[in-house]
Amino acid sequence: MDYEILAQEILKALGGEENLTSATHCMTRLRMKVRANDVVGWQELEAISGVMSVVKQADGEIHLIVGAGHAQKTHTALQSMLKSTSTSPETLAPKANGALAAIQRDLNKMLKKLHAIFIPLLPMMTLFGMLHFITLLLPASMLESAPMPWSIFPFLFSTLMILGVAFYSSQELGAHPLMGFGLLVLILFLVDPPTDRAFLGNILILTLFGSYFMAKLGHLVRKFVPNVLDLLLSNLITLLITLQVVFILQPFALGGTLGMNWVISFLFYDAHFMIRAVVGYLFVATFLWLVRRGIHHLFVLFYAMEFLAREGQVSLFPILAMAGAGQVGMAMAIWVKARTTGNVGLVNHVKKALPMAMLGMGEPLTYNVTQPTPRALLLSGLGAGIGGAWIAVMQVKMVAWGASGWLGIFLLRDLSMIRLYAIGVLFAYVGAFILGVIFIKRWMVRP
């Protein structure tokens, strides 16, 4: 794929460089903000080879789904064309009125920023998961003879995660990234490790809050410091005040860390298997609804906190991966129904998107098949909940997050969990397929 040509076609369809105010990306999407939606060629965007789907968000942001691996390369090609790089300016699209709408808008914005902080860390997490999988295939004698025991690698990757959060949280929230490193180093001197499990999580919470506070305070300080003294004083004043605030809030951050660790331990480790089954089912049944509202970004904090507290284990991610498997089962049911009604377009959408969804890249399936079909998203979650309950009951763990579907096998904690994970995926397929066959009517999938 020629990413320069793809970027040129996208930029042209968006109305040119002068209409583009922001261009960022996640694993599978390009996230665009434009000045005027009326000059965007929506049909041209959808017709571009390489763009799987076009999604217009409620806040005016345009998401182009191009697939894992392609998003970053296309974004790089796009940025090389732009005269200046824009970093998440405020969208000029009309905003909803009312206090509730404003609160929801601010909450979604905050959760998106939280998610954006961890997106650059996904390659590192996936690398850790793949390295762990390789060690499972190696003979024990080879690992024992290694100069460095594998058992310390979770701690090393946990340390890298904290460093990455310090860098990207400062960058995403508006402070200088190196200020985030400076803040992290000084926090490590200020914070006494309360317990092994809570220490790194406490550092993570303090770093996130400190970066946010430092970014806001830095803009305020620069309004009062003379330009000639800005380089000498602004960063120093900002950092010293931030450290005082962080030191005062340290007990509250520790309380939050211990509380989150207790919730994680109770729900996924210590609770009766019936409670785990209900929790697993409810998480999966509601996950797709949460995705549509952007609330699912909050879960990345739970992944990180458990990874730090449990030395490289993640329980919630394999449970939520069953929601994607449910969409596969639902798509199979829709395919059966669509064939009987002669809806060739929908049948082709399913054929194109189904293999990628089985490997964990379900967005083309969501926006082209399950979301446009009445009841399909809801039924997908309800059916897939059976798989989520199974994964929770059997306590299937991953050592990282990022890859789901059948690719999630490479992130499992040990080889004995491959069979359990596969059964969960099949349960999600079957559960959603049965609900689709029963409740998706032929009139819903007519051409």
Image (spheres, helix red, strand yellow):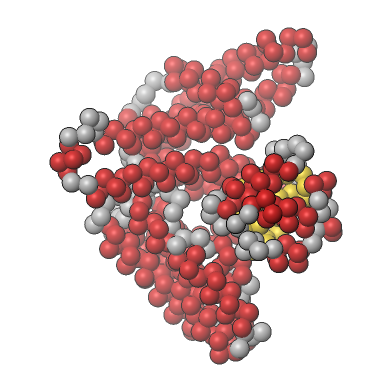
The answer to whether any part of residue 76 appears in the image is yes
Q: Residue at 46% of width from left, 31% of height from top?
A: 162
Q: Does 405 appear above or below 331?
A: above
Image position, residue 290 (x, y; %): 56, 58
Say which of 177 and 197 sits in front. Answer: 177
- Residue 435 place in picture, x, y as percent: 47, 78
Residue 214 lies in quadrant: top right
Q: Is residue 107 among the parts visible in the rendering?
A: no
Against 309, residue 230 (above or below) is above
Q: How many marks?
A: 0
User: Percent position (x, y) of residue 71?
Assistant: 59, 51
Quadrant location of the C terminus in the rendered image? bottom right
Residue 163 left/right relative to 312:
right
Quadrant occupied by the N terminus: bottom right
Q: Residue at x 34, y 33 (%)?
A: 155
Residue at image point 47% right, 44% down: 123
Left/right of residue 427 with respect to residue 226 in the rendered view: left
Write down the quadrant of residue 239 in the picture. Answer: top right
Residue 150 rendering spot, x and y as whole percentages? 26, 37
- Check the image and name the residue furthest to the left: 141
Taking 142 as reference, is 312 left or right? right
Q: Which one is in front, 250 or 30? A: 30
Q: Residue at x 74, y 49 (%)?
A: 33
Q: Nearer the viewer, residue 120 or 192?
A: 120
